[in-house]
Amino acid sequence: GAVVSQHPSWVICKSGTSVKIECRSLDFQATTMFWYRQFPKQSLMLMATSNEGSKATYEQGVEKDKFLINHASLTLSTLTVTSAHPEDSSFYICSARAGDSLMGETQYFGPGTRLLVL
Amino acid sequence: GQNIDQPTEMTATEGAIVQINCTYQTSGFNGLFWYQQHAGEAPTFLSYNVLDGLEEKGRFSSFLSRSKGYSYLLLKELQMKDSASYLCAVMDSNYQLIWGAGTKLIIKP
């Protein structure tokens, strides 16, 4: 149990284009999903927290108009990087938390999406 | 402020035992997590401690002392595949995860 998928795993795009990344909890319902970014040899950085059906909460310094998050259902959240630039190239990882009595507060991570903006 | 401290890097020998320490100061406490992250991959969940004491899962054990703000991850019978970063994270009173910077563990033959 507790499988989280992400799609795509790799994406290369031109500067100025938008990229959508999907995060799905496959075998549980996620009341909360998280989006992280990780640059090479650096720590995980939380970008935003999203609860199903409500607006995402963004961490300080993360532009909400640039990184659009939609948590449309209990099993799907999407992150759209709008007008991507080379400095947005990174490893984007989502995690999902059920927050129920069975699975508790553990965050389970997707495999990540590598974004390269040319 | 909230703070998680763990060593930046550790080296150990295949077959040996290694203990990775984590100390924390957070606003409230709702549990401590250990994750493993291989280079280029996403973190995978290892353990969760919310009560004091030792939790054992095969070759891996995790210990917590809430009064001391201290945890450790113990890895026994080390294998080359255990070479990875080990992340300590504490859930605060708002159920937010506060992450340590991770400990890079290097296993030598």
Image (spheres, coloured by chain):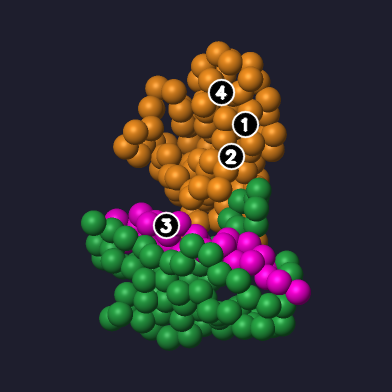
Chain colours: A orange, B green
Nearest to the observer: residue A66 or residue B101? B101
Asked if marks 3 and 1 touch (Cβ < 8 Å), the reply is: no
Residue A104: in sight, yes or no?
no
x and y percentages locating residue A100 in the rendered image:
45, 61
State the separation of the CA atoms marked 3 and 1. 23 Å
**Mark 4 or 1, which is nearer the eye?**
4
Answer few, some or many: residues within 10 Å of disc 4's Cα (few below 14, many 20 plus, some between 14 and 19).
some
Q: In the image, which disc is placed on residue A115?
A: 1
| Quadrant the C terminus of chain A occupies | top right
Asked if marks 4 and 3 touch (Cβ < 8 Å), the reply is: no
| Quadrant the N terminus of chain A occupies | bottom right
Asked if marks 1 and 2 touch (Cβ < 8 Å), the reply is: yes
**Mark 4: which secondary structure?**
helix
Side (left or right) of A96 relative to B84: left
**Residue under the image location 53 percent in, 43 percent down:** A38
Type of the residue with mark 1: Leu
Task: Provide the residue designation for mark 4.
Answer: A86
State the separation of the CA atoms marked 2 and 3. 17 Å
Type of the residue with mark 3: Trp
Task: Provide the residue designation for mark 3.
Answer: B99
Badge 4 and badge 2 both on one subunit: yes
Identify the chain of the residue marked 4, using the numbered disc in the image.
A
Say which label, 1 or 2, has the lower sequence index.
2
Task: Provide the residue designation for mark 2.
Answer: A91
Find the magenta span and give its range: B82-109
